[in-house]
Image: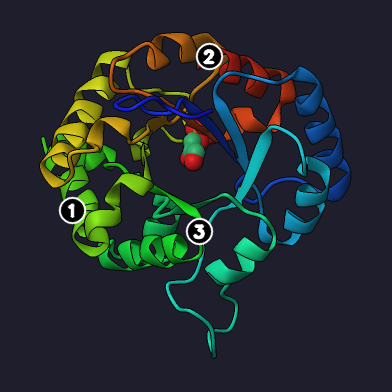
Amino acid sequence: MQASAGTPVKRVIGNWKMNGDRVANTDLLAELKKAGPWVAEVAVCVPFPYLGDVALSLQGGRIAWGAQDCSAHESGAYTGEVSAAMLAEFGCRYVLVGHSERRAGHGESDQLVADKAKRALAHGLTPVVCVGETLEQRDAGQTEEVVKRQLSAVIHTLGPCIPQIVVAYEPVWAIGTGRTATPEQAQAVHQRLRQQLHAATDKAARISLLYGGSVKPDNAVELFAQPDIDGGLIGGASLKAADFAAICRAAD
Ligand code: 13P
């Protein structure tokens, strides 16, 4: 769905992480296709080997698809990496960059994440830039400083292209823990992110800011009702068709 000038598109994006198999994926997508359409733009970000299957299954429909990472390099001797150009060939609309599981588990720096976002944009993909603080950082009162630093690298690297990204705020302590940020906690961070974007572009009001971290059907409505929360990035609940469909509905 197109946003009017000054309003962000509502989006719900599923992050399957390293889950699924070809049979389970087929069932999940068949159920999702039956459950839609939704007003919100809906997508699933799937493991690389399933992109071909998922593209075939979702082609021509209303659910978009994407990947969970891409290389910061264009092509060449980068064993194990997958380029943005390859993802574009498979019809991906989105690619997650800077998920905390990659920042923490693979040592991804703020600059590397920014370079990945730039490479994604160069191939017509929308990078979903993930930011978020650990529990230690929150307890130390560093939440704002951490997310600001993470987003800042992307703003500086993308320059005038910044309105083309999606941002996802995912507090690390809320991911897969069942402990979601309260709507007020999430809104407070989203508001700061929006202010930071406003300082960088006059189109900040149109950038979708998604919340992620233990979003479920029973907390999605309240989270998505916050003024600066434009939808969600959903992990565990995106693997259950009924739950994911209900969360998509909550963003309508
Ligand atoms: P959960 O919804 O399982 O907490 O995961 C959130 C997430 O990391 C999405 O990218």
- The disc, 1 or 3, on the residue closer to the chain's N-terminal end is 3
Which amino acid, mark 3?
A: Gly
Residue positioned 63% across, 31% down in the render: 238
Between 161 and 111, the one lying in front of the other is 161
Which amino acid, mark 2?
A: Asp
Task: Give the distance between the C-alpha atoms of the residues marked 1 and 2, in whole angstroms.
Answer: 30 Å
- Residue beneath label 2, please? 252
- Residue beneath label 3, please? 124
Disc 2 is placed on an element classified as loop
Which amino acid, mark 1?
A: Ser
- Residue beneath label 1, please? 152
Q: Is residue 176 visible?
A: no
The residue carrying pointer 1 sits among few (fewer than 14), some (14 to 19) or many (20 or more) residues within 10 Å by Cα, namely: some
Q: Give the x, y percent position of residue 114.
A: 31, 62
Labels 2, 3: front one: 3
Disc 3 is placed on an element classified as loop
Which of the image's four quarters has the N terminus? Answer: top right
Q: In screen coordinates, is 11 left or right of 172?
A: right
Q: Give the x, y percent position of residue 212.
A: 43, 32
Q: Which residue is outermost to the front? A: 5
Residue positioned 77% across, 40% down in the render: 60
